[in-house]
Amino acid sequence: MIQSFKMALKSIAGNKFRSFLTMLGIIIGVMALVILVSLVSGATGSVTDSISRLGNNLLTVTISDDKGSPINLKTLNEWMEKDGIGLIAPSDETSATARYEGNSSSVTIYGTTPPYETINGLSLLLGRFIKSSDVDNHTNVAVINETAATELIGYADCIGEEVSLDGVKYTVVGLLEDDEDSLTAVFGRGSIVAYIPYTSLMRLSAETTSNITSFFVSAETDMATAESVMTSLLMERFDQDDDAFTVSSRDALEDAMSSVTSVLMILLGSIAGISLIVGGIGIMNIMLVTVTERTREIGIRKAIGAGRGIILQQFLLESVVLCMFGCVIGVFLSWVVLRIISVVVSSLSISFTLEWNVVLIAVGFCFLIGIVFGLHPANKAAKMAPIDALRYNG
Amino acid sequence: MIDLKNVSRIYQVGSGKVYALDKATLHVDKGEFVSITGPSGSGKSTLMNIIGCLDTADSGTYLLDDIPIEDYTETELAKIRNRKIGFVFQNFNLINKLTAEENVELPLIYRGVGKAERKSRVSEALERVNLTNWSRHLPSELSGGQQQRVAIARAIITRPSLILGDEPTGNLDSKTTDEIMRIFRELHQQGNTIMLITHDRAIAEQASRIIHIRDGKLSEVRI
Ligand SMILES: Nc1ncnc2c1ncn2[C@@H]1O[C@H](COP(=O)(O)OP(=O)(O)O)[C@@H](O)[C@H]1O
Ligand SMILES: [Mg+2]
């Protein structure tokens, strides 16, 4: 076995350029597999990271059909008392034009109640968030984010300033930190946002009424309990019709994300796998040529006592060694390429590292290809009749 | 040790049949030195290849050491070639990529002999053919006579009882021919069975028996 291994190395080294060309298919296939999968997993790793950093602590409920018993602020207050439910805050949104002195810009306005701050983990820089009394009296107060302050008003310290939203004057009572990790930040940063009492939004936007169609729920203890309590409350209210509403948690988002990722991985993996198979066909081709070229050598070996098994093993080993060399070179080059990519995109704070399980898969796959595509040529060599092989003049 | 009965080997050439061997019957005892002569194309190599288990007969029986060869599989035949038979060819048939000692070592590797023993037997065999100083050279760096001596070393390394030579001196000048023949005579004196194909009358005369072949038919010339 060790002898056959040495012989295989010798014959591969004996024709370096041809061996390299043969390996090229495998090298490219391995690089495609390792680099693509590592890139995908690096990129999705960073996205799922930011999604899970959002915390997994709220449910989003949307009502599509209130069945004649709409939910209002009072209902939400009652539900907040139930076991398992933490806080509930309605959320409706509209766009409006905000003006301050000469400036104007488009702004996304959320109408909500005080619990919203805790549920969504907003952090105040200055002032206060919306109070219950603001909701009760539909006061015209607004809490804006940093982007809104700097772009609209021009400076951050803007508590007490008056801005007009679609022509209605609102007093700025609080300044929120731009949330780097919020869902909106993940999918589009730098938007101008204002929060106003839900009741005030009812006056500002014709589409917002006392019938609440969307709200956030936090858990008292754990999300699973909150989700089941919430679902049963809604089922009871809407005649056991689970099409009337949806309850979603961010778990679902992560699930969706990871299923997209795995589909992508499988897709890229199979493309790379196909290129590996093409590489394997190259190996088979060159091994067939090698066997023909070395017919005489095979005859000599058989004449001095090599049986079929020994010849088969010799050529099979040669094709496996060829594949494994290609694989090692491919993995090494993948590592180099990933390092280069990581340096180039280092500003994105995404890290692309060699995925060791993919490397393992690549190694296993190459081994398999070496055997599968080496078998036919090796068998051809093994089956040669010694006398015919000796007579061969190639 | 060799017992051929009515052995025929027929080649289909175009629409006709060529009897490379036509009902050849031959008995060779252990320790004999037999030379085989005959014109080119008469079937000498065919006979030798069948005796050496490289080829099989189309009809007739061949007993080697009282064992019928027809019954063996290819792998078993390879084992017999390895253990019982040493082959020396006209064109040497060395593996070009391997050095002299590696060529000589090969049959022992196939036989599964351990490394230490292989080394000592290789140097012994190379000493036997006077090539100790050339052991690390490739065949392309050796003269014809030297290459043939490497081939002889390879043939005797497994200590076979039967040594077959298919015109082993056919490509060599008379001086190297004498060297090679001296080795064969020594091997014969040590009790090996030797069969040589040759065109050379003088070489044939060195044997104790001469077999003549013509059109695949054997005839005993001298006992
Ligand atoms: N593989 C083959 N196919 C067809 N004919 C062959 C083959 N090998 C040998 N022959 C024929 O068999 C005859 C004997 O050949 P061979 O034993 O090589 O002769 P020699 O060694 O005496 O010169 C020749 O006529 C040759 O043409
Ligand atoms: Mg011949």
Image (cartoon, coloured by chain):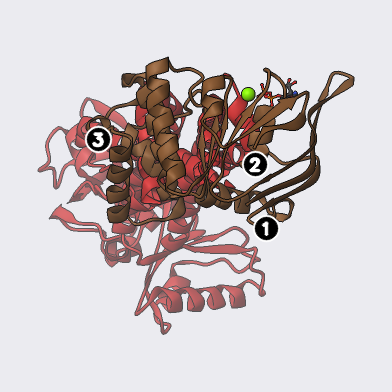
Chain colours: A red, B brown
| Label 1 packing within 10 angstroms: few (<14), some (14-19), many (20+) | few
Of helix, strand and loop, which one carries label 1? Answer: loop
Image position of A223 with respect to B110: above or below: below
Work out whether residue B146 or residue A46 is closer to the camera in this orientation and state it: B146
Q: Is residue A162 left or right of residue B49?
A: left
Which badge, 2 or 1, comes first in the chain's sequence?
2
**Disc 3 designates what residue?**
B132
Q: Position of residue A260 (x, y in %)?
A: 49, 48
Work out whether residue B129 or residue B113 is closer to the camera in this orientation and state it: B129
Q: Tell me which image quadrant ligand 2 sits in.
A: top right
Image position of A299 with respect to A264: above or below: above
Q: Which quadrant is the C terminus of chain B positioned in? A: top right
Which badge, 3 or 1, comes first in the chain's sequence?
1
Q: Of all residues shown, which one is farthest toward the front?
A: B223
Q: Quadrant of residue A322?
A: top left
Q: Is residue A166 visible?
A: no
Q: Of all residues shown, which one is farthest toward the bottom?
A: A83
**Disc 1 designates what residue?**
B66
Q: Which disc, if any, is residue B51?
A: 2
